[in-house]
Image (spheres, rainbow, N blue to C red):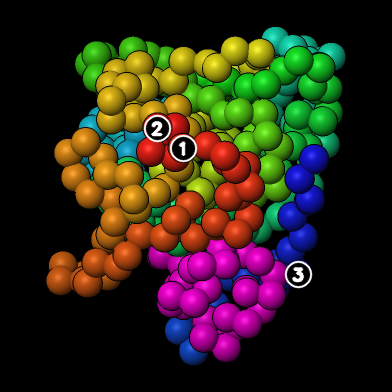
Amino acid sequence: MARRYQSKLTWDDVTPEHLFLNRRQIMAGTGALLGAGLIGGTAQAQDVLEPNTWEEITTYNNYYEFGTGKTDPSANAHTLTTSPWAVEIDGMVDNPGTYSFEDIMAGVEVEERIYRFRCVEAWSMVIPWNGFELADLLARVGVQDGARYVAFETALRPDEMPGVRVPVLDWPYREGLRLDEAMHPLTIMATGIYGRDIPNQNGAPMRLVVPWKYGFKSIKSIVRITLTDEEPPTSWNMANAREYGFYSNVNPNVPHRRWSQDSERRIGGGLFARRVPTLMFNGYEEDVASLYDGMDLSENY
């Protein structure tokens, strides 16, 4: 099993937004971020990663269940009821069942992770998530021998999600990971941003975050987790397999079929912000490259 992620930062170090947004303090604290491993190895040498503001993170989103425009989720997602909330965990597990959000949270340790977030559309952010390692939840339910993949489903509520009335995708939204990816210590279930409850448009009350993959892999508002021995179908791969592979690792060397992935636009940099080079595995190469030893990443995209 992969080593557990060890953070050296405390809530006092990283939670307050005004500390995140003070450039002088960010610069002074960069050494602590690097030492704690919160920023991927290659990314460390490129620049200081200043977290995006709350407004940027919560008003520029992809969440097609609430509309395909970037501002649609923040405008429409208030209709989503997030309490009560439950997650069905089934398949190849020792303790299948329907777990309330409160039950899940009672058995995990929430911590803060500052992660790069890279969208397949070639824009990026830096987000201070609050959450817990997915591996902890899987350990609680008991993964059975022979399980190789983890499948996820988003809630499907036509009365609360105006976007699903349009067949943009085959609803409900589905995603999946290989089991070793799911168990990796960088893979988290996020429940907050900047120490606040995660907003609806960002995937309330609980979403997946896999920082070395394109953003659409980090499925939102999860209601089902299934352990299986077969690669699960995933929404964007089902819609267009030539453009959206199962792995969808951030890779500047493998272009999208309609645009390059070798650079990205940082949200918050202004209209004329300079594009920056895309980093292999989104800057987490040192941590995750071994998961794909021997694989042809242009074939397994």
Pinpoint residue 55: horizontal percent, then vertical percent.
Answer: 36, 59
x then y, percent, for residue 218:
49, 37
Q: Which residues are magenta?
A: 25-54
Instruction: Describe residue 159's horizontal placement relative to residue 113 as left or right.
Output: left
Mark 2 or mark 3, whichever is nearer to me: 2
On whether residue 255 falls in the magenta region, the answer is: no
Quarter placement of the C terminus = top left
The amino acid beneath tag 3 is Lys
Could you tell me which secondary element the residue under label 2 belongs to?
loop
Q: Quadrant of the N terminus?
A: top right
Name the amino acid, label 1.
Asp
- Residue named by callout 1: 296
Q: Mark 3–mark 1 contact, CB under 8 Å?
A: no
> Residue 37 appears in which quarter of the rendering?
bottom right
Q: Are marks 2 and 1 in contact (CB under 8 Å)?
A: yes
**Amino acid type of the residue that numbered disc 2 sits on in the rendered structure:** Glu
In this picture, residue 269 sits left or right of residue 148: left
Residue at image position (27%, 44%) is: 255
* Image location (x, y in percent) of residue 285: 55, 56
Q: Residue at x 39, y 49 (%)?
A: 251
CA distance separating discs 2 and 1:
5 Å
Q: Secondary structure at mark 3?
A: loop
Q: Nearer the viewer, residue 29 or 71?
A: 29
Q: Where is 175 relative to 210, above or below? A: above
Q: Please tell me how crowded label 3 is: few (under 14), some (14-19), or many (20+) other residues with Cα within 10 Å.
A: few
Q: Circle 1 sits in a helix, a strand or a loop, which is it?
A: loop
Q: Which mark, by number, is residue 8?
A: 3
- Check residue 299 in the rendering and tell me which mark sits there, or answer none: 2
Alpha carbon of mark 2 to alpha carbon of mark 3: how far? Answer: 37 Å
Q: Which tag, 3 or 1, sits closer to the chain's start?
A: 3
Is residue 47 shown in magenta? yes
